[in-house]
Structures are given as C-alpha cells and as structure tokens.
Amino acid sequence: MQESCPSVKNILLLDSEGKRVAVKYFSEDWPSNASKLAYEKSVFTKTLKTNARTEAEITLFDGYIVVYKFVHDLHFFVTAGDDENELIITNVLQGFADSVGLLLRGDVEKRTALENLDLVLLCIDEIVDGGIILETDSHNIAGKVATNAVDGSVPFSEQTISQALATAREHLARSLLK
Amino acid sequence: MAQPLVVKKDDDLDEEEYYSPFLGIEKGAVLQEARVFHDPQLDARQCCQVITKLLYLLNQGDTFTKVEATEVFFATTKLFQSKDAGLRRMVYLMIKELSPSADEVIIVTSSLMKDMNSKTDMYRANAIRVLCRIIDSTLLTQIERYLKQAIVDKNPVVASAALVSGIYLLQTSPEVVKRWSNEVQEAVQSRSALVQFHALALLHQIRQNDRLAVSKLVTSLTRGSVRSPLAQCLLIRYTSQVIRESGANQGGDRPFFDFLESCLRNKAEMVILEAARAITELNGVTSRELTPAITVLQLFLSSSKPVLRFAAVRTLNKVASTHPLAVTNCNIDMESLISDQNRSIATLAITTLLKTGNESSVDRLMKQMTNFMSDIADEFKIVVVEAIRSLCLKFPLKYRSLMNFLSNILREEGGFEYKKAIVDSIIILIRDIPDAKESGLFHLCEFIEDCEFTYLSTQILHFLGNEGPKTSDPSKYIRYIYNRVILENATVRASAVSTLAKFGALVDSLKPRIFVLLRHCLFDGDDEVRDRATLYLKLLGGEATVGETEKDVNDFLFGSLDTPLVNLETSLRNYEPSDVPFDISSVPKETKSQPVAEKKATGKKATGSSAVSGPIPTVDASYEKLLSSIPEFADFGKLFKSSAPVELTEAETEYSVNVVKHIYDGHVVLQHFECVFLDISILQVTVLVDASEADEFLEVVSKPLKSLPYDSPGQTFVAFEKPEGVLATGKFSNVLRFIVKEVDPSSGEVEDDGVEDEYQLEDLEIVSADYMLKVGVSNFRNAWESMDPESERVDEYGLGVRESLAEAVSAVISILGMQPCEGTDVVPSNSRSHTCLLSGIFIGNVKVLVRLSFGISAPKEVAMKLAVRSDDPEISDRIHEIVANG
C-alpha cells in the first residue's frame, strides 16, 4: 500500500476529560461506537501527561500514528496508519487546530467550541473527505466555513478572507441554542 | 493518580452544567423540534440550530432508528426551499450523515443537481461531494457529464470536489470513472496545488493496474511540472513503485534516482522526508545512494519540532537494522535524543544506538539506559529489551553486563507483556550463549520466587526442567522448584512436579531425594498435581507401562507433542466415550495457516469474492465430516489433506467458482463451490473436469447440483482415482455446465424452459505440494538430530538468475509446500546467503525435514544445497525429485 494516497483515519476533538466535542472517523478500523470510544480513551490517556501546547506532538501506538496538539481545554488529534508520512498528517492537524482558532476568534475552549459546533463540524468536513485530504491551509478552511454563516448574503466567491472572518465573528456573538 | 482526577471532574461538572448548550439534550425532543423544517415560512437560524443538535446527537454516538432516520431525512429535504447559504451547508452535512437508502436518494437528486449547476461555486462543490456519496451507478451515468466538466472547472474547489468524489466512486463504479482520464490528465496540469494533488491521485488509481502507463506517467511528471508538496509526495511514492517493479536492470545507475535525490533539496519538509524515506527503502540500496538521505535526516534530528525528530529517528532506526554503518555518523545527535521529552523519540534513539553501537560503547549505553527505564511506558520497554537481546547475540562476550541489566529490570515493576519479553530474551540468550547458561538460570530461579504470572512461572519451570539437569550442579535448583510446590497455585504446582521428575530422570544421584519430594506431592489438594506425582513416581520407579526402557521414559518426559493443541482439543471434544480408546495418532497434524491478519489499512474490500468465501467452511474437521457423510467417498480411507480454496474465476464476474483439493491415499476429491451473481436461476450444475493432461487420474464419481439460486453458494464434487504411493501430478481444465432459466422479475417465478450453457473456468493443477502437510517442529535441531542420518540425501542445485534471494527462498518453499521453522522463511534484505529450515509430513504419514542453504552471487545467480532427512529414505529421494522437476 506504499504507493497509495495519504489518508487520514480519524479527526478527534476531545475536551480536557477525554469526552467528545466533535469526532469524525474515515476508516472502518473502528466499526462500533464502543470501539471508537475505547480508542478515544486510550489516545487521550496516553497523551495526557505530555506537553503538546507549543508544538504538535506525536506518538505511535497500536499500529497508528497519532499527532496531537492541546489548546486550553481542547485536545486536537489526527490519526493515520503507521506507514504514513508524519509531516503530512501534522499539516492536517495544524490546519484543523488553526482554522478552529480562526473561526472561534482565538477563543479556543470547550464552551465556545460547543456553542459553535456547527462551525467545527463544517470545518472537519472541509479538511478531509472520506480520508482524503481536501485542504490544509487554515485561512482557506476558515474562509470556506465562515461564508456559510446563516446571513451571508454576499456570494461566496466575492468575499475576502477578512470579510469571511467578520461573518464568523458575528456568528460567534449569537448564542447557539437560546 | 486516579483520585485527583475524579475530584477535578466534579468541579468541572458544575461549570459544565452552567455552560454546555447541549445539557440535558434528549433525542425524542430534538426529533420533535425537527418539525419546524415543515413550516411554510422557514426560520433559517432555528433550522440550523436543530440540525446542529441532531448532528451533536449523532456525533456523541446516538443512533436513529430506520423510521426516525427516514423522517428526519424527508424533513431535511424540505429545507432546500430556503435560500440561506449557511443552512444549505448544514443540510448537505446532514444528508451525508444520514446516508439515505437508494429509494430516498431520488428525492434529493434533483435539488442537488440544481445546486451542482448553480452559479455559486461553494454550492457546486458541496453538492458534488454530497451527491457522489449517496448515488448509485445508474444515477451516476446521468450526472457524469457534469462531473467531467467540474473536473476541469476553473474554480479549484469545484475541481477538487469532483476529483475527490472520483476517487471515492472508483471503488464502486470503476468503469464510469475510467472514462474521465482525459479530463483528469488536464487537471494534473492545474495551477492550483490541491487540484494537482487530487488529480494525480485519481489518475494513478485509474491506471494502477497498468504498469506501463504508471511508468509513462512518472517519466513525464518527474521532468518537473509538479509543484504542490502533496502532489510531490505522491509522485515520489509512484516513482519508488516504478523503481521497485523495474528492479531487473541492476548494475548501472538506478532510473529516477536523480529525481528522488533532487527532492531532498525541496523547500517542503514533507517532500524531503518522503524522498529520504523512499531512498532508504529502495531494494538493495548502496551506501553511496544512502548518504544524501542520511544527511538530511540527520539535520531533522536536531529540529525543534518533535514530529520532525520523530520522523527522522524512526526512519534511521529502520536503516540501522540493515545498514548500521551508514547511520553511525548520526550517533552524536542520536545520543542527545535519549533525554528527549517525547518518550517515543527517546526509545527509538536508544534502540538505534544499540543497533549501530560497537562493543566498546555497550557498557556506557547500558548505564544510560538504567536511568531511563523507570520513566517509559511498558511498550517502549519491550522495544528496548528486544534491542538488548539482539545486541547480546551480536556481542556474546558482553553477555555478563547485558544479562545483569535484564535481571535487574526483571526484578522491577512491570506488566505481563514486558516481563514475558524479558524472560523470553533470557531464555534465548541461555540457548545461544553457553557461558550465560548458569547465571541465566539462576536469574530465572530468583524471578519465580516472586512471580505473579502463572504463565511465566510454568514456562520457566518447563525450561528449567530441560536445562537444569545438564548443569554442573543440578541440586541447587531443587530448592527453588520445590518452593513452588509449597507456595504456588495448582497450575504452577503441577508444572513444578513435572520439572522435579525431569531432574529425577536425568540425574541419578538426585533420584532418591526426588522420590521423597514427589511422595509429598501425593497429598496435594489438587487432582492434577496428585495425578502427575503418581504417574512420575511409577515412571521413574520403572513400574509404569509407558516406559519399558530408560529411553522411553525420557521420550515421554522430554519429547514434544507433534500434534497441534488446537486439533487435539477439537478431536477430544468430538470423541464420544466408547469401547474404542481415544487414539492420538488419529488427530490431524496439519497446522492451520493463520488467517491472514486483516491488515487495517485495507479499506477496499473485494466485493464479489468475499460474498462467496464467507460461508465456505475452512476448518479441516468440517471437511472431513462432510466428505465422510457422502456415501461415494466413504471408502476412500482417511482424508490426508485439504488445500486452501483456489479461485477458478476472475473476481467480479457473473459466476464465481472456487475449488478445494482433498487428497486421500488413493483418491483425489475436488470440491467446487459455485455462486452466481446474476438474477437468474441455474439448474443441473456440474463442473466438467477434463483430466486428459493428467493421465494418472481416472474420474470415478461426479456429484452435480440440482439448482443454484441467485447469490447463495452451492457445491459439487468430482472424485478421481489415482495410483497409491505415486506422486501423481497434472493439469485439469474445467468447464462449468448448467441450464439457465430466467426468473420473471415481477412474480419471482422461474420460467419453464431453460437453455443449456457453459462457462469456461481456469485450469487447476495438482502439484507435489498437495501431498505435503505443513507441520512445524518446535526445535528443529533436536528433531533433525533425532532422525536417522542414513536417510539423509544431499544435493546441490543451481537456480539460475533470480530477482532476489528472498524470492528464490519463497519459490522453493512453495514448491515443497512445507512449514518453515523458526522464522527462517524471512530473508534479511541484502544478505548474500541464507539457511532455511522446513518440516512437513508427506502422504503416508512420513515425517520430512529439510535444510536449505542458499547463496547468491553478484549477477544474481542463486545456488542451493538441499539436505533432506525423513522417516523413509525413499521419500528423501522423492523430495529431491520434486525440486529437480520444479
């Protein structure tokens, strides 16, 4: 399988207790919800004591490469097969963490992420499709997600990044489920 | 550690109660809320919130019932009426999550197709992605035109969406996607980095079975039109594939090596890494080729980014196994990584150092490692233990300090896998380094004095029983063994009793004292312990029926069971109490080949063949039961061997047929499994087997199948007679003959008149390997020496020019069909010679052992020396004949 296309097995966003904020699996390696939860738990506990706040960290276990990064009370993970190029996967992680940062206007914590869960889910949708990397540039990702804000009447193609982020900010101001 | 975590959790819970927007969310209530989707005046914001809630539920692992999912799906389709862009995005996401069934898909197709042709690029891109996820191949042909246009669209997001969808669709509708080659080729030249990447990935997948096309693709692209780093990485992978497959023309410069080397100077780190790794993994890489790759990896070692250090040290670690000298330049950088914060990096660094280190650095490394062991996880400790084991085998003179290290860590805390790795290592060292025996055994004895793992205690006791009596002072071990009888659980006690008996059998001076100890065991509370003690007392006292002579006693005590335990267990379960005693020689000795561990990476599943192979019984016992229940085959005698199923049809055709060869002493039965994937009914199915090219076989019985319903497998049999004791081989051509009857699609009834039809199948061969059972032996050297040297036949063969040594070894193994022992089927890359040990049982229950020595010369000429020992010298000659004719 060496000559295959780089692929991502899952993208996880967990909180500081290892609970799900948003997850997306692209591989059949974990067929049931129970096996997914077990995987999340072991990834979380194995990485808990490490310091992944300034630079993305990496670990190898159970035949997977996991790259991860912690921001406040959020833990970002990206998993791939163990023969994958580590730097490609790290690019995906960086794109994910940074674009969430842009969309949440720097307020990267569990509470804001849950209040803007629609943005986080769209963000994952824009990064990887069926395991294949779609986009890793955080500004592009955030731009694509933010233009979908509910009242975005400007045609997408004509919006600049800064406008896009302004829409994201406005979106943030609304409490999601009041 | 657990305690403070729990307290913290409680604190957070209070906060969470206050904050989480999803607190107390409940599926039923949200499904009620979804009714707003039906409002004539849609409130986009409110709808968006409800969808988010639904997605939250799904994301947390909640599931919808079929009815709920359908209801939500229909409600969601209403939302296409809203013009709101944000809501539309959420609708797309929701549809993908619900993965609607085929009849539901039709409802959204037109809406999505409208979006696909919208003026808004973002609509187009997303609609393409959603639509391609949910449609089937008939609908696909309707939208194919739009997809082809989208691939060459000037908007990169739209083009990428179409290309990625193409990669996905290639698995389900390859014939459609293959028609897009021209458009995809155009997209490879795109200025957008990601479009280029996606186009290249799709183009390669379309052509992956066509070596020449891939090679052409690589040749044209390596001239430099690929700029995106991701696409560069792909190109490097494809290039190394081409290099690997064109491996024949060795000697001169490797094709495309210049390209790989130029990638080492790329701006993007991911490309540099990909190229460096590709170079290190080249077949038979030379040190001149390695040098530039090692140099860039060495730079990565001192990077501030953990991921980069990890990637570099992981690659170098692999290189160190085959080319330790190439990596020694990095040793200084590597040593500073021993104290790396990231323990994965530290472990990889230290094991690399162990592989590259020389004899003088061992002591220093050992010292560093002692500080290091306490704060790494068990799985890394195992890696270290394995590195030490191989180091010790490399430098046997250093066994003292290495053995000390192992015994020290054995005394520390650790889980089962870790302790097992240490014990295994010590046992291997004792076996291979005679000087280490006494101290090693002593460390193991110390360990079982305080060992919490029953498995390890019994393993050590067993080993002690075999090795202990042969040491200079066997009596000093008795104390440790008898302590087990006093202190441990029943399993360990029973095993200690056996060990005592072994000492008693081999050391005459200890015999009287062993008798005293064994008699004590007669009062044990456990049945097994008492039984063993009684048996051994009689055995050693010369009263039992098993042992007439001393040799028999020793055979009984030390001989290994050559029957696989799994088979023994099944046979014992099937044995019904009767007058006929259970006969151990009736247990099948074939080792079942492990079902190929499903590699996690294989995402694609063979659709056609998996459906057939599913219900086919693969267990020998069930074959035997089935065959003996068929009256025609009842008098064929005992089934000797059943082969693995052989496919007689290509994958994904209308008919699927595979066959299992059952070998008897004087007969061969071919069992065909048929399956039809057309919606027709076929009757009177037979497989016509033409044995005209296999003149020693005579067809005796053919059992056809009355009817074969759609998609459910059936089976037919053909039996042949063959001369007994002759190694009959030959080729059979096969034709599937049957009567086709159409099924009326409306009523499901089978129409009356059928048409006779035939379907050509692939040929089947019966080869000499079919007469050989794969049966392993646990200790090849013992088994070899216990065979009669008179039966040995040795000869040398030239195998001509082969691709590699490994290829030659596996070819010979497959011709003989024997079980490789002690992992000798694996050939280290770049080695010039190799010895391979094989064992098996030949038809007629003749045990055969084979020792193969291979050598390869510079122009890839392989020579082989074949030594055979077997129970029957005639069979030894026969084995040589097989090789000479193969």
Image (tube, rainbow, N blue to C red):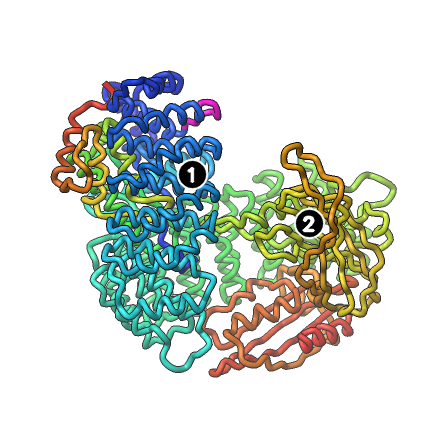
Compare residues B325 and B461 and report the one nearer the observer: B325
Q: Amino acid at mark 1?
A: Ile
Residue at mark 2: B674
Quarter where residue B712 is shown: top right
Question: Is residue B122 found inside the magenta-colored segment of the image?
Answer: no
Relative side of B497 to B828, left or right: right
Count of labels in the image: 2
Quarter where residue A155 is shown: top left
| Mark 1 or 2: the one toward you | 1
Percent coordinates x, y for residue B700 in the rendering: 85, 58
Compare residues B809 and B418 and report the one nearer the observer: B809
Q: Assess disc 1: are there few (<14), some (14-19) or many (≥20) residues with their C-alpha within 10 Å of its C-alpha.
A: many
Q: Is residue B375 above or below residue A112?
A: below
| Residue at 26% from the left image edge and 68% from the top image edge | B224
Relative side of B284 to B573, left or right: left
Quarter where residue B19 is shown: top left
| Residue at 66% from the left image edge and 42% from the top image edge | B710
| Residue at 27% from the left image edge and 31% from the top image edge | A118
Same chain for the residues under marks 1 and 2 in the image: yes
Q: Is residue B107 above or below residue B552?
A: above
Relative side of A147 to B799, left or right: left
SS of the residue at dot 1? helix
Residue at mark 1: B134
Q: Assess disc 2: are there few (<14), some (14-19) or many (≥20) residues with their C-alpha within 10 Å of its C-alpha.
A: many
Chain for mark 2? Answer: B
Does the image show residue A53? yes
Please state the extent of the stretch shown in magenta in the rendering: B62-68
Q: Amino acid at mark 2?
A: Glu
Percent coordinates x, y for residue B520 in the rendering: 68, 42
| Residue at 37% from the left image edge and 29% from the top image edge | B60
